[in-house]
Image (tube, grey):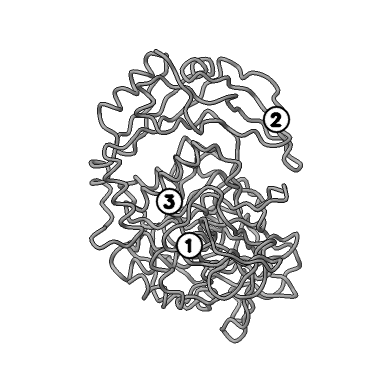
Amino acid sequence: MSRHPVAGSDHPVPAGAQCVGACDPADHFDVVLILRRQDEAGFRALVDGITAGAPGAQPVSRADYEQRFGASAADVKRAEAFASAHGLAVVKADAGARRVVLSGTVQQYNDAFGVDLQRFEHQVGTLKQHFRQPVGPVHLPDDMHEIVTAVVGLDSRAKVQPHFRIESTAPASVGDGPVHAPIRAARAVSRSFTPLQLADLYDFPAGDGKGQCIALIEMGGGYAQADLQAYFSALGVAQPQVEAVSVDQTKNAPTGDPNGPDGEVTLDVEIAGSLAPAALIAVYFAPNSEAGFVNAVSAALHDSQRKPSVISISWGAPESVWSQQSLGALNDALQTAVALGVTVCAASGDSGSEDGVGDGADHVDFPASSPYVLGCGGTHVTAANGRISRETVWSNGSDGATGGGVSMTFALPAWQKGLRLVRANGGAGSLVRRGVPDVAGDADPATGYAVHIGGTDTVVGGTSAVAPLWAALIARINASGGKAAGFVNAKLYAQPGAFNDVTSGSNGDYTAGPGWDACTGLGTPVGSKVAAALA
């Protein structure tokens, strides 16, 4: 049977990476086939209706979703037959999540998918990264082209980065209110805040998230129970139930290094947990790869035991580094979130309008750039007497700047039509594609979050802190309203008065101004008004 290339399955090789030879033919790993939905037209109508706010368009339960929109038994059988024909073992077939997990060797995958798996070496800062990647596109026979929407797992490169920045200057007092020892680290010339203080500054509605589950997506690292116990005790907050969920055999594995992935994981847990202490904080650990990311989000969405109502993602990468197939697979999962009524909050990045690419062009971070996500940008906050006295765009030289700009991948959503884009050079014009971010919150490490990581009190910023901040706000709103807010973007854009409008500062090529901008979106939350807008 003839085979044809799968559109978008070429994997871009990072600049400076060197091919060092073919992979060992006997190397063994897993690959995931993502299958088509049974009723793609019905699914598309549902998602389009929900995002447009159409009357009667309501999310479905996980059980209903899997029955209506999962993969058909016939397609699963066809995928299993393909695997058998190429000597690949079927580790798991999940029709509801539309996934068939295969296990095999490099040689078997080369033969099955018509690829040439090669080893690459790439210097990233002071670290040398080694990864596996196919040369050329994936090929599938005609009967598999019909049913497979993506093949993920052939590429092992760690692409996404955690979006946090640790404040590195001398300790001082915290915030402008009472200090909860041992939370005592901050920059001497500025201020830091506990999440509770920021919730007060942003007028969060009362609540503890009872009955909700907040899912945190983490690509490695871990949290230590001793850190969490010390932190929540110091804040005077009841310790939330925190549960580690393993995806693709990746477990909670703290290294004790606050500058590595532990910093991200612990930051996310401490912010979400302190603001929604009665919610279940489910931490989905996956390997840092395109397949790991897609699988982690899917695992959270299809978790019928914990049933997350909001997902916080503090990891991402520029749109340009993703293969189109993997980007499409993750965006497909984010559309599933819309259909299930799950809100997804994602950090917009910490490297300004270039998103760290360094090619002189503007880039935005994915998944924050997905139109099915609430993209979260960052600000610098000054407060006095329990009130915000000034808030500007976070842009602080080597300490980073909020990501934001215009997507090169996604079209302009209906709820962003009519918006203006203002550039730092004075140019302005209509927004013509998906603009990022949607909302914002405190992110400058100079005015960051007092946390406890690796046995040490420290101050952390970055847009990665804003995603769990917003996730906790949504969880409080869900708990008090008795139902999940689900896809919130359209409702929030219809209520610009629910935000503190940030009108000063820039993130490189874009500048803040009245209303939405490509630095801080609509602005930072006035929590009680956000709750009313989503009621």
Residue 322 vertical placement versus 90 (above, below): below
**Relative depth, front residue between 149 and 255:** 149
Q: Position of residue 249 (x, y in %)?
A: 47, 35
Q: Residue at x 54, y 54 (%)?
A: 314
Q: Give the number of marks.
A: 3
**Relative depth, front residue between 186 and 397:** 397
**Of pointers 3 and 1, the one earlier in the residue sequence:** 3
Residue 295 vertical placement versus 225 (above, below): above
Of badges 3 and 2, the one in the foreground is 2
- Tag 3 and tag 1, C-beta contact below 8 Å: no
> Which residue is tagged 3?
243
Determine the secondary structure under disc 1: helix
Determine the secondary structure under disc 2: strand
Indicate left or right for 461 with 307 as reference: right
Q: Position of residue 136 (x, y in %)?
A: 57, 24
> Which residue is tagged 2?
121
Residue type at mark 1 is Ala
> Which residue is tagged 1?
272
Tell me the quadrant of the picture where the C terminus can be found.
bottom left
Q: Position of residue 421 (x, y in %)?
A: 58, 65
Residue type at mark 2 is Glu
